[in-house]
Amino acid sequence: MTEMVTLRVNGREHPCRAGIATTLLTVLRDQCELPGTKRGCNQGVCGACSVLVGGKPVRACLTLATDCEDREVTTIEGVGTPARPNAVQQALIDTGAVQCGFCTPGMVIAATALLEEHPDADIETIRQGLSSNLCRCSGYRKIVEAVSLAARRTAS
Ligand code: FES
Ligand code: FES
């Protein structure tokens, strides 16, 4: 059985249908037409599905859509645009830290939330903060460097 829920995503209201086990990830991708949030493991392990709910990073594959009513959801589409990337996105581009890109939306969300909380994050803080976001392509070094660059640019 499903019910109508209205999600507020990236500042827009999205009326959706959700059952008791429907995840936020499913609704975002299949009903809100926001495919930037990736379905990786679908088990809470990889971080590819990270989004912000009430400004805090969550795994959309483990979050029930019905629990997100009346809360602001921000996906990668709401963080920046190709024309106006946020500081983390710009730094990832500038340092060539994107390979296949599958993990990138989740990394950007996690890093953006991390820098919001720790604007002066050092390398170790960034490494730890991103440690539960998995990347199949890289050794993480460039991603951590990019987030560090974003932190320095934001601070200056
Ligand atoms: S898809 Fe949600 S943590 Fe992997
Ligand atoms: S860039 Fe390919 S999974 Fe991270």
Image (cartoon, helix red, strand yellow):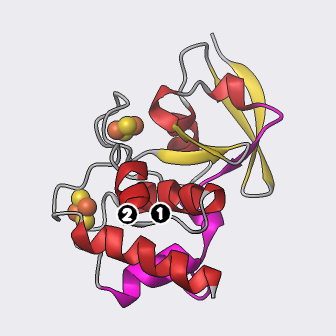
Does the magenta-highlighted stretch encompass residue 43? no
* Rendering quarter of residue 140: bottom left
* Rendering quarter of residue 146: bottom left
Kind of residue indicated by mark 2: Thr
Judge the density around disc 1: few (<14), some (14-19), many (≥20) Cα neighbours within 10 Å.
many
Magenta part of the chain: 69-95
Residue occupying the far top of the picture? 1
Which residue is the site of mark 1?
108
Ligand 1 occupies quarter: top left
In depth, the one of 130 and 55 nearer the eye is 130
* Rendering quarter of residue 97: bottom left
Whether residues under marks 1 and 2 lie with C-beta atoms below 8 angstroms apart, the answer is: yes
Residue drawn at (37%, 63%), measured in percent from left and top? Answer: 104
Does the magenta-highlighted stretch encompass residue 93? yes
Task: For ligand 2, tell me if the residue under mark 2 lies within 8 Å.
Answer: yes
Lateral position of residue 94 relative to residue 90, left or right: left
